[in-house]
Amino acid sequence: MSAVGMFHNRSVWLVKSRAQRTAVATAASRREVVSTLTLLPGVTLIRGGGHFPGGTMLHWAQGAEGRGALLSADIATVTTDRKFLSFMRSYPNLIPLSAREVEGIAGAVAPFPFDRIYGHYFDRVIASGAKDVLARSVARYLAAIAGTARGPME
């Protein structure tokens, strides 16, 4: 992530892809572009990629009563039954995300402990066991796009 400008005397941070990882000069400072950024103690932005290279999630270490929470936006979307996550290149056009990109999302959040995921809709929350739900969802998704899934996708 890189401070690319100033807004009301505050740095504006944008996430860049690994291919764009360089040192970027700003009016206020010079910082290296990274895949995570600690905003406050226990509050970290994570560049997960997904349907665009700068797709960013937020990890809140003290969320979920101290068990950790991930705010996944639409990078990993909570399904309507709240049992799984899913991944799309384009939601409006229903274009699936590649295996490499889904594995990248899972890898980006792997170092962070979390028990809850808040999706991009207010009512889409995985209240507990979210890290396990992510692992099952990635395996389920990869099997589905590879054509190796057998039986119901539940």
Image (tube, rainbow, N blue to C red):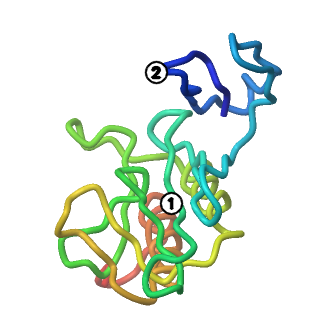
Image disc number at residue 146: 1
Q: Nearer the viewer, residue 67 or 79?
A: 67
The correct choice, above or below, for 150 with respect to 48 in the image is below
Label 1 environment density (alpha carbons within 10 Å; few <14, some 14–19, many ≥20): few
Give residue 141's position: percent from left, percent from top: 44, 66
Residue at the (62%, 78%) spot, across then down: 113
Give residue 38's position: percent from left, percent from top: 66, 52
Say whether residue 70 is left or right of residue 33. Answer: left
Q: Nearer the viewer, residue 2 or 144?
A: 2
Residue at the (57%, 50%) spot, across then down: 45
User: Which amino acid, mark 1?
Assistant: Ala
Say whether residue 90 is left or right of residue 110. Answer: left
Quadrant placement of the N terminus? top right
The correct choice, above or below, for 37 with respect to 154 in the image is above
Residue at the (51%, 69%) spot, across then down: 138
Q: Residue furthest front?
A: 9
Label 2 environment density (alpha carbons within 10 Å; few <14, some 14–19, many ≥20): few
Say whether residue 71 is left or right of residue 95. Answer: right
Quadrant placement of the C terminus? bottom left
The correct choice, above or below, for 3 with respect to 58 in the image is above
Q: Which residue is mark 2?
A: 8
Q: Nearer the viewer, residue 115 or 106?
A: 115
